[in-house]
Every structure is written in structure tokens, then in C-alpha cells.
């Protein structure tokens, strides 16, 4: 369980490298945005672990459907992570330090070379499946959770 909690905190904080809080004395508030189908028990476990292990204030937003404009079906049905991040950015309030979207749906991005071109072969990298993505620097990240744990780990959590 600590490994899962550490992963979430690492995703959250790595997306915020060089991100400066407005005031250093303000408490860190992490918002978790579950998307339709995300396991509520697992969400509660993640929130509880973040609060007890890292002493963070955690807010759980109401479950929402994934935005349809992020859906693609290039290789397999997936949601574009960059579109999901923009969607989360609109949902972030000034009172929230970080927001993390959580889903069990496949997410993807386009893998590019340093010059901005799609990495070759383009058929492979145009719709590249990923576990998560975050703005760097920034307070917003997104994670596909069920890809990260195997059936045995899921059984142990439950």
C-alpha cells in the first residue's frame, strides 16, 4: 500500500517541479477527481494514505464522466491525456494546491522527438499508451491507475 501511495505522491509532486505556492504558510490541499468507473474503495484508500502518511488535506470531488472531446480510437479506444489535463485545469480552484484525475480507462499521448516531430515509426508513437501525465511545472496531473497494479496486488488492497 505504501508503494501505491508513494507512486501517487510522486506523480503529483513531479508534475509540480518548480511550481511555487502563493504563500508558503498555506496548507497543501490535494484534490482527487475520480472519473466514472473508478473504484470508490480504492479512492478512499488513496485519500486516507495521503492524509495519514504525508499529512496532506485531501478533497475528493464528485465522480464525473470523462470528457468526450478527449476520446480517440486510433489503435484502441483511449482518452488523450493532454486533453484530460486541460479539462482538469478548468476544474482547479485557487484554494486547491494540486489536483489529480484518476481513471481506470486507457489514456495516451503522442510521443515526439526533441524537434517536435512524431517519433518514428509514427504508427506506433502517434497514440502512445501511458500511465499518467502532468504539467511541469504545475499543479495538475492525471493517472490511469489499474494499469499499475496486477491482480494479486488488487486482491491484497481489497
Image: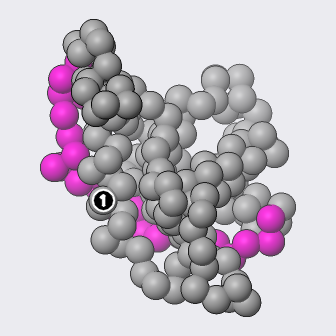
Local crowd size for mark 1, using a 10 Å CA cut-off: few (<14), some (14–19), many (≥20) = some
Percent x, y of residue 71 = 20, 40
* Residue 52 lies in quadrant: bottom right
How many marks overall? 1
- Give the residue at the far top of this rendering: 121
Front residue of 10 and 62: 10
* Residue 111 lies in quadrant: top left
- Point 23% across, 13% down: residue: 123
Q: With 127 as the anchor, is 9 left or right in this view?
A: right
On screen, residue 115 above or below 7: above
On screen, residue 140 above or below 36: below
Tag 1 residue:
86
Percent x, y of residue 124 = 30, 13
Front residue of 142 and 151: 142
Q: Quadrant of the N terminus?
A: top right
> Circle 1 sits in a helix, a strand or a loop, which is it?
helix
Front residue of 22 and 38: 22
* Residue 86 lies in quadrant: bottom left
- Point 47% across, 51% down: residue: 134
Q: Quadrant of the C terminus?
A: top right
Q: Which residues are magenta?
A: 54-78
- Point 18% across, 27% down: residue: 73
Percent x, y of residue 157 = 73, 39
Q: Is residue 37 magenta?
A: no
- Point 51% across, 65% down: residue: 139
On screen, residue 130 above or below 36: above
- Give the residue at the far front of this rendering: 115
Any part of residue 140 in sight? yes
Percent x, y of residue 125 = 31, 20
Front residue of 158 and 112: 112
Amino acid at each position: 500500500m505504501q508503494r501505491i501511495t508513494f507512486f501517487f505522491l510522486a506523480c503529483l509532486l513531479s508534475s509540480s517541479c518548480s511550481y511555487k505556492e502563493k504563500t508558503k504558510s498555506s496548507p497543501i490541499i490535494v484534490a482527487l477527481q475520480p472519473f466514472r468507473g473508478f473504484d470508490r474503495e480504492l479512492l478512499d484508500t488513496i485519500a486516507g494514505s495521503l492524509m495519514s502518511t504525508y499529512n496532506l488535506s485531501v478533497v475528493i470531488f464528485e465522480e464525473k464522466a470523462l470528457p468526450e472531446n478527449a476520446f480517440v480510437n486510433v489503435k484502441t479506444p483511449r482518452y488523450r491525456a493532454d486533453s484530460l489535463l486541460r479539462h482538469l485545469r478548468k476544474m482547479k480552484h485557487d484554494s486547491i494546491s494540486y489536483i489529480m484525475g484518476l481513471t481506470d480507462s486507457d489514456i495516451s499521448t503522442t510521443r515526439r522527438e526533441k524537434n517536435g516531430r512524431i517519433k518514428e515509426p509514427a504508427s506506433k508513437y502517434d497514440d502512445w499508451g501511458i500511465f499518467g501525465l502532468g504539467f511541469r511545472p504545475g499543479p495538475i496531473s492525471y493517472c490511469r491507475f489499474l494499469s499499475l497494479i496486477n491482480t494479486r496486488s488488487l486482491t491484497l488492497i481489497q
